[in-house]
Amino acid sequence: MGNVPTTVKHCLSYEQLIQDYPWLKRWLLEEKEIVPTGVKIQLIDMLSGTGLPVIEATSFVSSKWVPQMADHTDVLRGIQREPHVRYPVLTPNMQGFQDAVAAGATEVAVFGSASETFSKKNINCSIDESMLRFEEVIKAAKERQIPVRGYVSCALGCPLEGHIEPSKVSQVAKRLYEMGCYEISLGDTIGVGTPGSMFKMLQSVMNEVPTNALAVHCHDTYGQALPNILTALQMGVCVVDSAVAGLGGCPYAQGSSGNVSTEDVLYMLHGMGIETGVNLTKVIEAGDFICNALRRDTNSRVARARTL
Amino acid sequence: PSPTSSPLCHPLVRAGQALPEKVKIVEVGPRDGLQNEKTIVPTETKIHLIDMLSASGLSVIEATSFVSPKWVPQMADQVEVMKGIGRKPGVSYPVLTPNLKGFQAAVKAGASEVAIFGAASELFSKKNINCSVEESLQRFDEVMRTAKEAGVPVRGYVSCVLGCPYEGKVAPEKVAHVAKRLYSMGCYEISLGDTIGVGTPGSMSKMLEVVSREVPVNALAVHCHDTYGQALANILVALQMGISVVDSSVAGLGGCPYAHGASGNVATEDVVYMLHGLGIQTGVDLPKLMDAGAFICRTLNRKSNSKVAQATCKL
């Protein structure tokens, strides 16, 4: 290929993966009623049939803090596991990890922050302290050959601190990667990022973590998710987090949207000739199902346009 | 798709690619926006909206349309609007003129810039204005000649550039053909419209590659609809390819006329947020723009389509 830049090589030789994270934990925090276990299981089963390779099923956080995830064991046991699909679960600490393994989890995720203040407010400890907790989990996971994914929140801004230095994001991402996370998902938690800040942040992180171990988790609170994802793709990132029907509001801005919709991301990727292996129509169906069950409108513009 | 036309592989289109330093925003809310809203807005409200937009730093505000009120009753007060607005120095207030009669009425009412439009789809042209694309362009010959004599600049619009509600796919070559015609006829700028919002960075980059061979890129603008949520991504790719004029509508006014209930115009607030985040100058004061958006939404008794406006958390 000669002088062809890396980005071009990537798009010609790597299959773009899209990973779907229903973010059951997050969106249920905004829903007034607790969704029945049967509905959660049905949603995951529908998503399993769409071609999505990764579906984040539930969270092993203490049900004292997140009552909506109290049925985590029932959910994990109740879903039909498609052979080529992975079902990671969130595990904030050793207790959660052990419960997850007992319930049959085969992949887990840990959650760090690029903002000290956010870390203290959200999980009651500093970033360093949280890393020590995760180290335990990652060690135990390694012994069981359970892959661990790492999340970095507030990658493009913090609701409490405001601006977040890209170097802080790379520090945390590097730490998680070196501890053994196979992939780091960089989250624009409050959706304030733009292609400008996304570019700067990724440039910094890509100095510390290989691009093929990076993912972006964009929120659409300011409508910037798709151009931010496009920027990440242009820089060689090929893993994208999204939520069917754009479920999960922004917990810091009442009434604002949060997660980017899987349907809208797929529409863009397919329009660009990027393979995802996912059937958009089936994802729209899964989105319709859960929106009916929650008695709410979809956040996906594609879903809205297609049903008209 | 050929490797060179994907926005991931296009040699010019890479993140970090030098973007324009300045982008001119063409605000179409008062015309394109209000024309497609269900509620007909009183003249004073339109005037107040335009005055608020003028105060926000926008340099081009499409004020009204001189189409016959028989077809577009929402624009029946075209003359009063033109006469009632405060004309801020340095700001242009173009109006739509579908034919010579409309042009003459526009000039009489004080218009100093006009716009004409053609479609990149034959079926759309026939269904919309009852004639072929070529016939529609010939009708504008008169307008162009008269405008030239009067020293009135003319902007050209091309609709259905990334897809047509009747024909489906639209060939980039057809878009280039119509854009070139309008440009050679004397339009100083050609706004390429994704009328039903079906475009993606893939089809946008392919189309612009072909069109920019026929019309200089500094005479091109993009008019993206957000019906499928793709507008900002499409605009980003256009900027990466050298486009520096973007059409948008305050509060995302104006639904998609072909998909009832679907969103239409991209919201100016969301575009400005992205451009400022990229370090691109627009001259627009975002809080003042948001005030204008809040005003018109209150009056229309509807929620803003702008996500920036909807977000209440502030950094």
Image: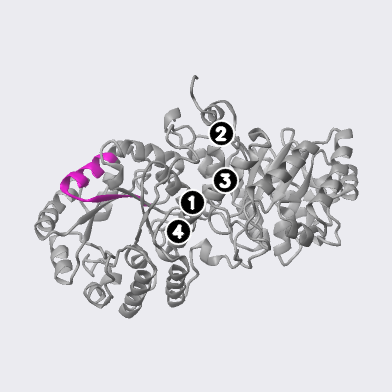
Q: Is residue A69 magenta?
A: no
For mark 2, give the secondary structure.
loop
Cα distance in 3D space between marks 4 and 2: 31 Å
Bin the neighbour count of mark 3 within 10 Å (Cα to Cα): few under 14, some 14-19, many 20 and up. Answer: some
> Magenta part of the protein: which range?
B176-195
Whether residue B39 is situated above or below residue B126 in the rendered picture = below
Q: Nearer the viewer, residue B7 or B16?
A: B16
Instruction: Name the quadrant of the C terminus of chain B.
Output: bottom right
Q: Residue at x 48, y 37 (%)?
A: B14
Q: Nearer the viewer, mark 1 or mark 4?
A: 1
Cα distance in 3D space between marks 3 and 1: 10 Å
Bin the neighbour count of mark 2 within 10 Å (Cα to Cα): few under 14, some 14-19, many 20 and up. Answer: some
**Residues tagged by mark 4 and mark 2 found on one chain of the structure:** no
Instruction: Name the quadrant of the N terminus of chain B.
Output: top left
Q: Which mark is residue A68?
A: none
Q: Which mark is residue B272?
A: 4
For mark 4, give the secondary structure.
helix
Contact (Cβ within 8 Å) of mark 1 with mark 4? no
